[in-house]
Image: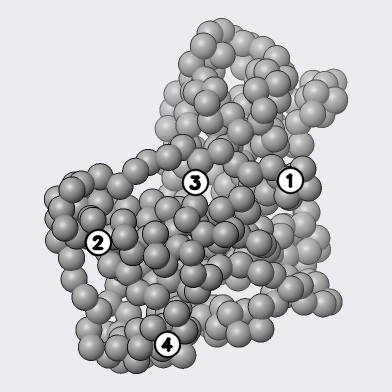
Amino acid sequence: MLLVEADEVQARAHTVALIACGFQVDLVPGSANVLDHLPQVQASTWDAVVIDLAPSFDGLELKRRLRAAGSVAPTLIISDDTSAGTAVRCMQAGAVHYQPKPVSVERLVDLVRWSAGLATIRRNALGLVPTVIEQPLVGHSPAIAQLRTAIHRIGRQDVPVLLHGESGTGKELVARALHDASARARAPFVAFNVAAVPEALVDSELFGYRRGAFTGAVGEHPGVIASAHGGTLLLDEIGDMPLAMQARLLRFLQEGEVRALGARTAQTVDVRVIAATHVDLPAAVAAGRFREDLFYRLNVAPLVVPRSATGSATSRRWPRTSSRSTAAGARGR
């Protein structure tokens, strides 16, 4: 997302909170020369744009230029000006929401999440595919060479993949490479970090909700699973998923249907699921923290991401308890 914030203190607070919730934030200081600082190459990749309507620059002109640059991201305007006239001007300029200050971190996060869901709907409706800035795997070690070969081989097979590696090894980068190597490459790639979302919100974020489904549900949210329809869904830090949600995820993997909170009927969704974790899942299964049936459903094509994908090199194998799933995956291939 793009955050254009005039107040430096608020900018830092908002950026930290949004990153903690799993967003990638491009922060630009609100000033007269803000347009000179914009990373224009990423205009089509933003899922949300938040503009602080400061007197030091024309935020509405910024909104128009972003649209001209190819951005379909919904724009949220925040401002000290609480007059109805300013709110009307912002909405006429195409903003999806006008939020008077002060705006709490919680409120901002909710608005950005809603905006990101709306951006996905817009892209799907327009047949657009977000531009992905390619980040090739780094390294020339045997482990990295094997990883590249595995990505090329497994990417073409429409089966679930379970990525294991330490934090910071580039598991999302590998997941994107698998998506790009697949027949789904022109469809959405959606990443969802389970650990970055409060437990109480995992259900609504994954499966979506309808307006009025609960207090505060002022709009509709398709959910990240439905947003990835036709493409690839990365469930990062799957080992931190609550047990109750593991049961719902397993049902989706079995049936291929999701039911949003407040919806009367289920929706068929076609996605390839890639799960990633730094947790020893077989040990979590043995300890009762992770469902065995979900583990085997996800572990069709296990792949270890060595540290050399982003720097130094190391690798490890799943404990022997995972061999049942590996064999099943081999038969399927």
Query: Which labelled disc corresponds to residue 331?
Result: 4
Of badges 2 and 3, the one in the foreground is: 2
CB within 8 Å, label 3 to label 1: no
Residue 111 position in % (x across, y down): 65, 45
Residue in the picture at 43% in, 71% down: 161
Q: The residue under label 2 is which amino acid type?
A: Gln
Which amino acid type is shown beneath numbered disc 3? Phe
Which mark's residue is nearer the viewer, 3 or 4? 4
Q: What residue is disc 3 on? A: 23
Place of residue 262 in the rendered image (x, y in percent of width and height, measured from the top left): 78, 71
Q: Which residue is mark 2?
A: 146
Q: Which element carries disc 2, helix, strand or loop?
A: helix
Q: Are marks 3 and 4 in contact (CB under 8 Å)?
A: no
Please state the horizontal and vertical placement of residue 134, each as a whole percent of the image: 43, 40
For label 4, count other residues whose C-alpha is less than 10 Å away and answer few (under 14), some (14-19) or many (20+). few
Above-or-below relation of 88 to 230: above
Q: CA distance from mark 4 to mark 1?
A: 36 Å
**Snapshot quadrant of residue 73:** top right
Which of marks 4 and 3 precedes in the sequence?
A: 3
Give the residue type that dot 4 points to.
Answer: Arg
Mark 1 and mark 2 in contact (Cβ < 8 Å)?
Answer: no
Counting residues from the start of the chain, the first of labels 2 and 1 encountered is: 1
Q: Which mark is residue 127?
A: 1
Q: Assign the C terminus to one quadrant of the image.
A: bottom left
The CA distance from mark 3 to mark 1 is 23 Å
Residue 285 visible (yes or no) = no
Nearest to the observer: residue 313 or residue 332: 332
The earlier-in-sequence mark between 2 and 3 is: 3
Q: Earlier in the sequence, mark 4 or mark 1?
A: 1
